[in-house]
Image: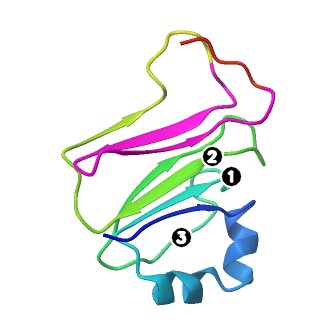
Amino acid sequence: MRLISWNVNGLRAAVKKGFQESFDQLAPDILALQEIKLQEGQIEMELPGYHQYWNYAEKKGYSGTAVFTKKAPNQVTYGIGIDEPTPKVRNATIYSEIYGSDHCPVGLEIKI
């Protein structure tokens, strides 16, 4: 299994710099992106054969994660499972491969 975690620091910028070519060459089973820095509808990703799971930041231009999987998961959850508000944390956990993609900015304290 090929699992890739990639902090793209802005997915739209990464797309302009050859993201699709890198993705095609790497051919991951699971690709987890952090710091996508976009909102729903700002980009259309055509990745045939992949299921897509997005967790956008609440504030434009901030964080966000996306996970792409070849195999459909049994379950997908968003958030980190605590009631405390965590507006800067973006998480998606894919259950079947048991993998989570988290983005937690440096200096942010989370009490679990």
Residue 66 spot, x, y in % from top left = 51, 54
Q: Is residue 50 above or below residue 78?
A: below
Q: CA distance from mark 2 to mark 3?
A: 15 Å
Please tell me which of labels 2 and 3 falls first in the chain: 3
Which mark lies nearer to you, 1 or 3? 1
Q: Is residue 85 above or below residue 91?
A: above
Say which amino acid is labelled 3.
Glu
Please tell me which of labels 2 and 1 falls first in the chain: 1
Q: Secondary structure at mark 1?
A: loop
Say which amino acid is labelled 2.
Gly
Say which amino acid is labelled 1.
Glu
Q: Are marks 2 and 1 in contact (CB under 8 Å)?
A: yes
Graded by Cα atoms within 10 Å as few (under 14), some (14 to 19) or many (20 or more), the crowding at tag 1 reads: many
Residue 43 spot, x, y in % from top left = 60, 66
Q: CA distance from mark 2 to mark 1?
A: 5 Å
Q: Is residue 67 left or right of residue 18?
A: left
- Quarter assignment of residue 60: top right
In the image, 86 versus 97, the foreground residue is: 97
- Quarter assignment of residue 74: top left
Residue 79 spot, x, y in % from top left = 48, 29
Q: Is residue 39 above or below residue 19?
A: above
Q: Which mark is residue 64?
A: 2
In magenta, the rendered stretch is 86-107
Q: Which mark is residue 44?
A: 3
Q: Are marks 1 and 3 in contact (CB under 8 Å)?
A: no
| Residue 101 is one of the magenta-drawn residues | yes
Q: Which mark is residue 35?
A: 1
Q: Residue at x 30, y 45 (%)?
A: 98
In the image, 99 versus 91, the foreground residue is: 99
